[in-house]
Image (cartoon, rainbow, N blue to C red):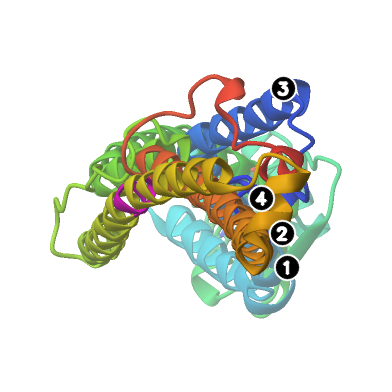
Amino acid sequence: MPDTSTTPPNGNEGPVSGDTGQASAEARRREALIDRMGRFDHSFFVRMIVGFLLLTLVVAALEIGLRYTAVLWDFHRVEQDRPELAARDLAEDIRSIMLNEGGPVASRTVYPILERNFRRAGLRIAVEPSEDTRTAIERIYGFTPEGIPADWPEGTFNEGTLEVRAESACLRCHVDSEVGDPLGTVLVRDYLDHRLDDWWDELRLTATVNLAKAGAHTVILFLLLRVLMAPLLSLRSAVARLGKGTSGLRIRAEVASADEFGELAHDLNSFLDRITGLMDELRRTTGRTVSLNTRLTHLTRDAREQLERVEAAVTEALPENEEEWQARGAEGARLTRVMQELHQLRHHVQGIESLEERLDDAADDGQRLLSRLLADPPSDPDDQPPDPDSAV
Ligand code: HEC
């Protein structure tokens, strides 16, 4: 019978030389693995949360980029005529100021207000009196009209201009002009920088809000994960304890939820139940083998004793000297043959005894392996199965 009883329980590493150094190295390797597994949930949390944060940041960055593009697009494509429209409004404003009672002189107080209003809408304005207006007003009012002097900042802009032309009602004061002559020019500029400033201001505001939001979401995610992952963690700790083997196969996972985790725990438990059942059966079979072997031992011992008694009797009956051999003739020869047969028999009994010893060892090994699997931690390394040579 080939000697399979010496295969170590963790026998995927090839033949173990019974060397304790290797056994403890194996134990350390397993410990390290479990350690790594222990950090798995931790790092899973971290990865999940870092991933979520990164995703939030990427989305925020995308949003910022998109808004920036939208600002550029608006400025260059969509709202190019905005200053043109604003210039029309401004011209209309000036017209109403001029026609207002005392308006023209009050214009100097009204202009700053106009300027401010336009600037609030993101636009810069200027109003230039025409040459005719200048001479006429200087002559009638005695001061040089300034309109709204241009004070343009640097930068990219869209511009709208419009000439304010004279109507008959205007000629009362604008005495050098005819109807339809330009009395002045209004200029409106829409600066890109101004829009980008707005974009930046909004960005700063939303960045703070978004950061706070991302923080709050992360905390919520963390709490949610903790709750949702709890069954998985308990399942994992059950499997880790199974892996350590300190509690044999008695461990069962807690079925804490009705979801996939719960199903997984349930499946693991049924698997363990089946294995445990098989182990119990195996234990019973091994027990039967042991008791059969015990009976065999008794029988063999009886047979040996019997054999020894028969041997003694035959030895006694053998002739003692040459004369007796002569006297007893054929009977002596028969006794010698019986003696030879008895020797043969003794040889067979010895064979049975040695087989039975090996059977005993094998049954012991089986029982030891079983109790290891079912309950006990791997005890001291001397408790290894016997090495192959002693069993031969
Ligand atoms: C009652 C007199 C009066 C009438 C009427 C009048 N203006 Fe003037 N206008 C002024 C004076 C005064 C100024 C100079 C204001 C200044 O620059 O301080 C002026 C200046 C202007 C300017 C140059 C911008 C400026 O403020 O210097 C424009 C353009 C203008 N007028 C258009 C008109 C138009 C268009 C009408 C008719 C719808 C009109 N005005 C009617 C007195 C008048």
Q: 58 or 380, which is in the foreground? A: 380
Mark 3 or 1: in front is: 3
Mark 3 / mark 4, whichever is N-terminal: 4
Q: Are circles 2 and 4 on residues that touch, CB within 8 Å?
A: no
Q: 137 or 194, which is in the foreground? A: 194
Please name the residue shown 38% across and 36% down the image.
Answer: 241
Q: Are circles 3 and 1 on residues that touch, CB within 8 Å?
A: no
Residue 187: mark: 2
Name which quarter of the figure residue 176 lies in: bottom right
How many residues crowd mark 2 within 10 Å: few (<14), some (14–19), many (20+)?
many
Type of the residue with mark 4: Gly
Q: Are circles 1 and 2 on residues that touch, CB within 8 Å?
A: yes
The magenta stretch spans residue 342: no
Query: Can you identify the residue that label 1 sits on?
Result: 161
Q: Can residue 150 be seen in this view?
A: yes
Label 3, ligand 1: CB separation under 8 Å: no
